[in-house]
Amino acid sequence: MLHRPPETRSELATWSRRLGAFAVPVLVIVIIAHRSGLMPTVEALVVIAFAFGFAALALVLSLLAAALIWHDGRRGGRDAAIGALWAVVALSPAAYLGVEWMDFPKVTDVSTDVVDPPLHREAAFLRAGWLNSARPPNPEERARIRAAWPEIVTRRFSVGSDLLFLVTRRLVEEEGWKVTEMVQPNGDGERGRIEAVARTLIFGFEDDVVVRVLPEPSGSRIDLRSSIRWGTHDFGRNARRIRDFLDELDRRVVASYGR
């Protein structure tokens, strides 16, 4: 009778599958808990970091297991493949942010008016401790912002400030931003402003937005400022938020008033 040695199963492949299958539901639970207000942002960031770490470890173990399976014919190829799949799913947000990190300059605060940006009022009382300061960007950051997004500038319209503010307010509401302060412009040259909180699409992190509407002799002007509360890099989302908002505002003003 021929002696057939017992087949060896790859423990690395098994652990890869376990860690990968653990990381994905952890991320889903964190997203749901944070967006619903059940988990504070600090705790959510810590858990997200651990989940990404588990997913990265699962991917490394999967690759090591695949190499050993190829080398000596161990069992566990299916577990290694499943672990790699789970890891890729869990790490996809991190990979996307990594690309954005390289594509965009390292800024936390973007405004159409870099010289005199709209000021945070309500957010200034909240942004303390670990949160980013509510102070406007320093000259170095302003230069990076202007170089990266030269198209993000003050917009001027030939309509009055009251009409422009009305369209702006409706657009803010449709964006789903949580308004924390609203001051309407009046006929005496008083500026209008809207301060609001916007949330990121997936994880629901809070960013602060200020909209300022000023009357001018030939119409009115609008400035926007968007800044992140957490982190040292906004991954380009402040600029995208401002650009998308102003492009839609242009379309609506033209559609409503023809100019």
Image (cartoon, rainbow, N blue to C red):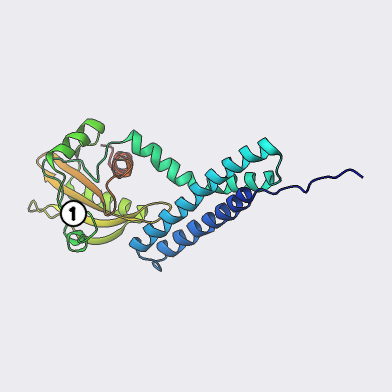
Most foreground residue, 226 or 81 = 81
Q: Quadrant of the N terminus?
A: top right
Residue 228 in percent (x, y) is at 27, 51
Give the secondary structure at mark 1. Answer: loop
Residue 197 in percent (x, y) is at 29, 57
Picture quadrant where residue 73 is located: top right
**95 displayed left or right of 141:** right
Residue for point 56% across, 52% down: 20
**Amino acid carrying mark 1 in the image:** Ser
Residue for point 36% across, 52% down: 175
Residue denoted by label 1: 133
**43 displayed left or right of 89:** left
Most foreground residue, 12 or 178 = 12
Picture quadrant where residue 37 is located: bottom left
Picture quadrant where residue 85 is located: top right
Residue found at the very far left of the displayed protein: 188
Residue 90 appears in the picture as rendered: no
Residue found at the very far right of the displayed protein: 1
Q: Quadrant of the C terminus?
A: top left
| Rendered position, 190 above or below 60 | below
Most foreground residue, 92 or 170 = 92
Residue 140 in percent (x, y) is at 15, 37
Residue found at the very far bottom of the displayed protein: 38
Residue 13 in percent (x, y) is at 62, 48
Most foreground residue, 225 or 63 = 63
Crowding at dot 1, Cα within 10 Å, few <14 / some 14-19 / many 20+, comes out as some
| Rendered position, 69 above or below 128 | above
Q: How many marks?
A: 1
Residue 86 appears in the picture as rendered: yes
